[in-house]
Amino acid sequence: MTTPVPGHQVPGVQPEELPEQLPEGSVLLDVREEDEWRAGHAPDAVHLPMSDLVQRLDEIPEADQLYVICRSGGRSAKVTAYLNANGWDAVNVERGMNGWAAIGRPMVSDDGEPYVL
C-alpha cells in the first residue's frame, strides 16, 4: 500500500457526525487486526485487516459510501487514501474506535465484554 501524497487531504468524519444507523448503501469497514476486532467492534462493521487489504480488495462490499475505521484514525486514513486513489469513495472515521467508544456507540465482541484494544 502506498503512502498518501503529502498535501492531499484525506476526507474524514468524526464519529459524532455519523448517524447511529448508517444510511442504506453505506458500509463501515474496520481495518484493524484480528485480535483488535475480536476485542470489540461496531455491530454492523465489515472486517478487512489493513495487512490483508490489497490482496482482498474484491471482498470490499459494494457501497455508495465507505467509512473506514481503525483504533485511532491513522491506519484508516492510509486505507482511505489508498481506496480513494483506486476508485472507491471512502471517508476516514477520525479518532477511530477510541472515539466511537468514547461517545457510547454500540460495540460487540467475540470474547465477552467489548472494549477497544
Image: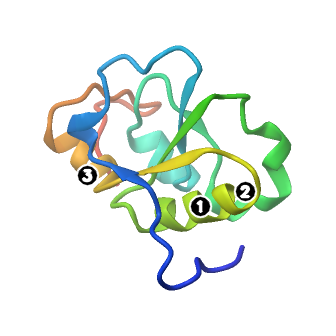
Q: Image point 50% across, 52% down: which residue?
A: 35
Q: Which amino acid does label 1 sit on?
A: Val
Could you tell me which secondary element the residue under label 3 belongs to? Answer: helix
Task: Locate the N terminus by quadrant.
Answer: bottom right
Q: Where is residue 47 in the image (x, y as percent from the top left)?
A: 60, 40
Q: Nearer the viewer, mark 1 or mark 3?
A: 1
Residue beneath disc 2: 53
Q: Position of residue 93 (x, y in %)?
A: 38, 49
In the foreground, 84 or 78 = 84
- Nearer-N-terminus badge (1/3): 1
Q: What residue type is labelled 3?
A: Asn
Residue beneath disc 1: 79
Residues at circles 1 and 2 in contact by the CB criterion of under 8 Å: yes
Q: Residues within 10 Å of mark 1 (few under 14, many from 20)?
A: many
Quadrant in the rendering for residue 78: bottom right
Q: How crowded is mark 3: few (under 14 residues within 10 Å), some or many (20 or more)?
A: some
Q: Where residue 98 is drawn, which disc sits there?
A: 3
Q: Position of residue 108 (x, y in %)?
A: 37, 27
Looking at the picture, does residue 35 appear above or below residue 104? below
State the separation of the CA atoms marked 2 and 3. Answer: 22 Å
State the separation of the CA atoms marked 1 and 3. Answer: 18 Å
Give left or right: position of 100 versus 9: left
Give left or right: position of 17 versus 59: left
Q: Where residue 45 is drawn, which disc sits there?
A: none
